[in-house]
């Protein structure tokens, strides 16, 4: 069972408290080529491209201008470098090494700059969402640039790991980068809903954190079959069979 998640805009590059081996991102060469292209942008052009505040644009302009193309000294494992709601739910710092190794084998992070990452792959600080309208070479956007590599990598990882299912815990923005018709196993989507004002709905902040908690649940229980996901009870959620389908698991609290 292979799972996928999205990256995060927020980053944490403080020193690691655990001794985690850094692996090399599969498409690091592609990432470096993208960075070389982005380095040619002026500050104003980068701000317009990223659609961010002046402060965030300056920060990322400096990141790209001082990008280190070799060595691991400034890199941090992706699972620990991303710091958004999903990663708060995972809380990787408190996972055992055994659970972290399970994620290294069975979790992939889809990225606008790195394509596909394993949890221990070293990354540098950046800002580049998959939906950013960046043209590069013959590619009109990042989806067009990455989709073949991402899809083939997911297929290869499924086959190499003898996975029977792909568990989608990514946002639609990143899941769209996969050519789903080519995936050789069933895809199961997980949805997390809360009651608000008497109505059941998906609340973005809670849903993102719940995706991360599901990743943690998979790691701590070494879940190998989708039906075992139905035991997920972290954060007060419970599987709701009446709202679920064969390819969609709904969890409610």
Image (cartoon, helix red, strand yellow):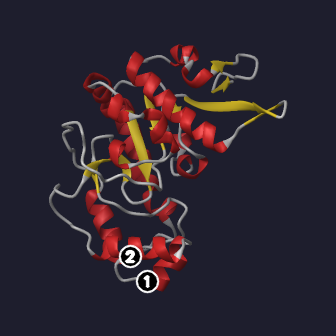
The correct choice, above or below, for 45 with respect to 104 in the image is below
Q: Position of residue 119 (x, y in %)?
A: 33, 40
The residue where tag 1 is placed is 43
Question: Under tag 2, what secondary structure?
Answer: helix
Is residue 160 visible to the viewer in this orientation of the structure? no
* Quadrant in the rendering for residue 75: bottom left
Marks 2 and 1, the one that precedes in the sequence: 1
Q: Position of residue 216 (x, y in %)?
A: 44, 27
Q: Which mark is residue 71?
A: none
Between 124 and 162, the one nearer to me in the picture: 124
Q: Position of residue 244 (x, y in %)?
A: 70, 22
Between 63 and 141, the one nearer to me in the picture: 63
Farthest right residue in view: 198
Identify the residue shown where x is 58% and y is 52%.
Answer: 173
* Quadrant in the rendering for residue 236: top right
Image quarter where the C terminus lies is: top right
């Amino acid at each position: 069972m292979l799972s996928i998640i999205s990256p995060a805009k927020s980053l944490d590059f403080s020193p690691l408290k655990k001794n985690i081996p850094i692996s090399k991102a599969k498409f690091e060469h592609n990432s470096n080529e993208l960075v070389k292209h982005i380095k040619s942008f002026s500050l104003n052009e980068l701000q317009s491209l990223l659609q961010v505040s002046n402060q965030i644009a300056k920060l990322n302009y400096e990141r790209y201008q001082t990008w280190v193309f070799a060595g691991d000294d400034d890199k941090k494992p992706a699972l620990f470098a991303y710091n958004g709601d999903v990663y708060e739910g995972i809380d990787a710092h408190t996972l055992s090494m055994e659970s972290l190794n399970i994620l290294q084998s069975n979790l992939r992070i889809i990225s606008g700059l790195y394509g596909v990452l394993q949890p221990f792959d070293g990354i540098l600080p950046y800002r580049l969402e998959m939906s950013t309208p960046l043209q590069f070479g013959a590619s009109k956007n990042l989806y067009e640039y990455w989709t073949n590599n991402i899809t083939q990598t997911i297929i290869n990882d499924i086959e190499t790991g003898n996975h029977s299912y792909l568990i989608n815990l990514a946002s639609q923005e990143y899941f769209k980068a996969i050519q789903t018709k080519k995936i050789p196993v069933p895809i199961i989507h997980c949805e997390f809903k809360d009651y608000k004002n008497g109505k059941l709905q998906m609340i973005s902040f809670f849903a993102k954190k719940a995706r991360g908690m599901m990743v943690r649940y998979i790691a701590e229980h070494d879940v190998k079959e989708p039906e075992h996901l139905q035991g997920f009870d972290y954060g007060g959620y419970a599987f709701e069979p009446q709202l679920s389908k064969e390819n969609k698991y709904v969890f409610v609290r």
